């Protein structure tokens, strides 16, 4: 449907956001990390859940997008998160992403009022699309009901792709509910469905998944990219097995602090351990166990390669 | 504990926010409505849930606070909502409220990540308090787990009032769980506990409740204010009964569109019906029934008095 879909399946990382000790954003480290992710074959779903996007101010996000572009990070590899509770802010951020030439936006529903009706959610997305008013907007819906409390139903997808077929082009399904992912894949052929875990590739790719947008793409981007390329060849199975082991290790820990801790170790920069409240930084009670499990699994992030 | 507590019990209205047809904020109508609420004996919990606060941009909220102050609405009658997912934004809004001399702030926890730990929530409130760094900050916690997914536990209250006894002075309990309200009232004498419904006054006032902060204070502020003054006199029971009838009518409808519809009718300004997505405006299928029920209850908002 879009350029992205015409390419082979892609992996996007919801790039982690590094903070200084005073919890201000460390833009330099962010740019360096994004550059590394791209070099490893990953696209950038900056301002995703795992980026602590909702712990960032709107102006911090707009400034970071501009910094990434200035630093030469290719905008056509970015699908920033732009969904916010306040419509004017969601419009402003989506507009900024389009202005910079981003490949798309990954747009949460407003997540304070619940339950939200499909009429209300349709109006939210419609107003963003109409206000931005650009053919260049490629909007990906973001279904993550465990955090939003506001599911994106198949009925809503149907309404949105009927009204805006060239704009509403895909979805990230972070529900962790495979039956839901499968239903979206089967009901909406050509619509780009991204499961939120590389562990699901073996089930999702045969049904036409567009790839994956996964938290753990922050730490194993290259292995995921290689697995996507190896799809349909005998090499795929071994890579899928490797991905599942690492994914499983992180999934049993507080995900964001765990990812940041591993990045801190891999890049030799303890500043990566900082998180903004309400998250709590990696803790000796589990972080050493995490590192030991990863060593046992022969995990190597390959940072600096 | 604060000036507010030293006064008799108070009612605060989470003032509804009027929008123009293009969904921009109608500041003039907002100022006029706030002025009316104060004239009726209510304080202003502007930017509460029923204000659609989380559907307003940060800069809209700061601008509205300044407009209210310029219009001569007394800041010592205001406890604006200032809690936001992004700590820098929560700090900026809390700082603006303190700078304008507001009586307090009603501060939501960050509501995207769930579950949130008490350690993480303590850090969030502590960072706001430390960053604002003013003795004039009187912070009210906001417990509304049905929307935030992030409860304010008694253990967290205990930690916060121990660390910041002069700053963390109260809570609004919107849980609708009377046992929880009762527990807070009993466990924290002197801490200002505001139930979120005037229907609970007869149970809450004997236990020392500070008053109430109620959605329906937007439409029956004066009756609530009179009930609070009549507490301990024979008149109270009749007023409490009247309040409960009206509260019950609204509670069975979509609360915010229903309140806005009644204000639209009372002030003769249909613009009040506008809501921002994901809310959906009052609908003929229920709005006429609402008006009929209110007529049957002899409800009169007394607007313009």
Image (cartoon, coloured by chain):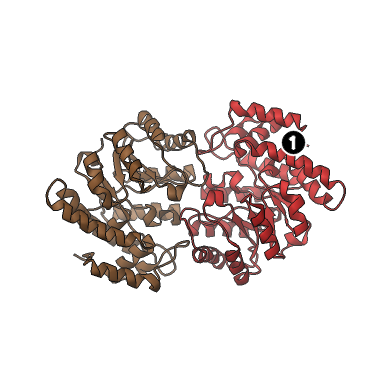
Chain colours: A brown, B red
* Residue that appears at 30% across and 51% down: A197
Q: Secondary structure at mark 1?
A: loop
**Quadrant into which the N terminus of chain A falls:** top left
B214 vs B68, nearest the viewer: B214
Q: Chain of mark 1?
A: B
Depth order, front residue of A208/B305: A208
Q: Nearer the viewer, residue B9 or B175?
A: B175
Q: Position of residue B235 (x, y in %)?
A: 86, 46
Where residue B267 appears, as percent x and y from the top left, is 70, 33
Residue A10 appears anywhere in the view: no
**Which residue position holds label 1?**
B301
Looking at the image, residue B260 lies above or below residue A244:
above
Residue B70, compared with residue A250, is above or below; it is above
Q: Position of residue A90 (x, y in %)?
A: 44, 44
Query: Where, by quadrant of the figure, is residue A305 drawn?
Result: bottom left
Residue B174 relative to residue B149: left or right: right
| Relative depth, front residue between A43 and A211 | A211
Looking at this view, name the residue that lies furthest to the right.
B234
Position of residue A7 measured from the top left corner of the image (x, y, whole percent): 19, 42
Dot 1, how many residues are within 10 Å of its Cα: few (below 14), some (14-19), or many (20+)?
A: some
Horizontal side of residue A155 vs A192, given as left or right: right
**In percent of the image, x 47 and y 53: which residue is there?**
B112
Residue A47 falls left or right of residue B99? left
Q: Is residue A184 visible?
A: yes
User: Exactly how many numbered labels are in the figure?
Assistant: 1
Q: Is residue B158 left or right of residue A263?
A: right
């Amino acid at each position: 449907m879009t350029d992205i879909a015409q390419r082979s399946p892609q992996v996007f990382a919801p790039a982690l956001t590094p903070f200084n000790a005073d919890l201000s954003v460390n833009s330099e480290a962010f740019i360096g990390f994004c550059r590394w992710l791209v070099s490893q074959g990953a696209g950038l779903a900056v301002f995703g859940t795992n980026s602590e996007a909702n712990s960032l101010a709107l102006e911090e996000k707009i400034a970071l997008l501009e910094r990434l572009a200035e630093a030469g990070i290719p905008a056509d590899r970015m699908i920033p998160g732009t969904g916010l509770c306040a419509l004017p802010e969601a419009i402003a951020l989506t507009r900024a992403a389009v202005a910079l030439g981003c490949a798309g936006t990954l747009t949460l529903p407003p997540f304070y009022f619940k339950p939200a009706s499909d009429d209300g959610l349709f109006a939210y997305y419609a107003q963003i699309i109409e206000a931005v008013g650009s053919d260049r907007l490629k909007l990906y819906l973001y279904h993550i009901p465990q955090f939003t409390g506001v599911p994106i139903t198949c009925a809503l997808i149907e309404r949105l792709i009927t009204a805006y077929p060239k704009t509403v082009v895909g979805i990230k399904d972070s529900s962790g509910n495979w039956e839901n992912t499968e239903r979206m894949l089967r009901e909406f052929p050509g619509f780009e469905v991204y499961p939120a875990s590389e562990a699901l590739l073996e089930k999702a790719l045969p049904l036409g998944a567009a790839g994956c947008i996964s938290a753990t793409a922050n730490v194993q981007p290259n292995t995921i990219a290689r697995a996507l390329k190896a799809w349909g060849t005998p090499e795929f199975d071994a890579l899928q097995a490797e991905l599942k082991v690492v994914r499983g290790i992180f999934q049993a820990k507080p995900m964001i602090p765990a990812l940041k801790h591993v990045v801190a170790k891999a890049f030799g920069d303890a500043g990566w351990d900082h998180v903004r409240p309400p998250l709590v930084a990696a803790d000796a009670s589990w972080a050493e166990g995490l590192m030991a499990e990863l060593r046992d699994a022969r995990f190597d992030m390959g940072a600096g390669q």
